[in-house]
Amino acid sequence: MAQTTADGVEGVQGLVGRHLGYSDWVTITQEQVNQFAEATGDHQWIHVDPERAKKESPFGGPIAHGYLTLSLLPSLMPEIVEITGFRMGVNYGTEKVRFPSPVPVGAKVRAGATLEAATPFEGGVQMNLAVTVETEGGSKPAMVATVVYRRYL
């Protein structure tokens, strides 16, 4: 269940500047990493070869792809915020993404979000959110991004 809810353009605009909450923690598995590698063609050994990654990588074992971390947002964001009063919503883009620290396979991650802007346009509202994905017990975020969603009336 979402921690924050809003209805319609005015409801969304009322959330500007607010931290909207956090998702639940989810565990990153080697199977997820392998499936992501298959889907994207990124088979770099630091992701898909646990034995080599344990011996040779500076991370002490396999890590998730940065873009896998980003790809978790569609499943994590509904746990943070629920927007009603629109017929549909789309991922409109990402203005900035950084991966300050790796996500080790087996780690738990969660997302947190703050609504930075809600700009009406003809037929809806554009939402710019500052999203941080953190690793449980980590000292730095795994991912920071400004993501843009559009909701259509």
Image (cartoon, rainbow, N blue to C red):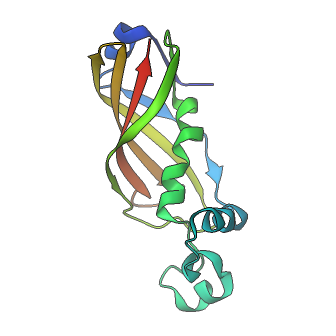
136 lies left or right of 142: right
Q: Is residue 22 visible?
A: yes
Label total for image? 0
Q: Nearer the viewer, residue 67 or 144?
A: 67
Q: Position of residue 40 (x, y in %)?
A: 57, 64
Q: Position of residue 58 (x, y in %)?
A: 47, 84
Q: Which of 48 and 93 is in front in this view?
A: 93
Tell me what residue is drawn at x 40 percent, y 26 percent.
150
Q: Quadrant of residue 114?
A: top left
- The quarter of the rendered structure image containing the C terminus is top left
Q: Position of residue 21 (x, y in %)?
A: 47, 31
Q: In which quarter of the image is residue 151?
A: top left
Q: As drawn, which residue projects farthest toward the front?
A: 122
Tell me what residue is drawn at x 67 percent, y 87 percent.
51
Q: Nearer the viewer, residue 91 or 28?
A: 91
- The quarter of the rendered structure image containing the N terminus is top right
Tell me what residue is drawn at x 52 percent, y 66 percent.
65
34 lies left or right of 111: right
Tell me what residue is drawn at x 30 percent, y 13 percent.
122
Q: As drawn, which residue projects farthest toward the right?
A: 31
Q: Is residue 137 visible?
A: no
Q: In this view, does 51 lie above or below 90?
A: below
Q: Position of residue 81 (x, y in %)?
A: 50, 25
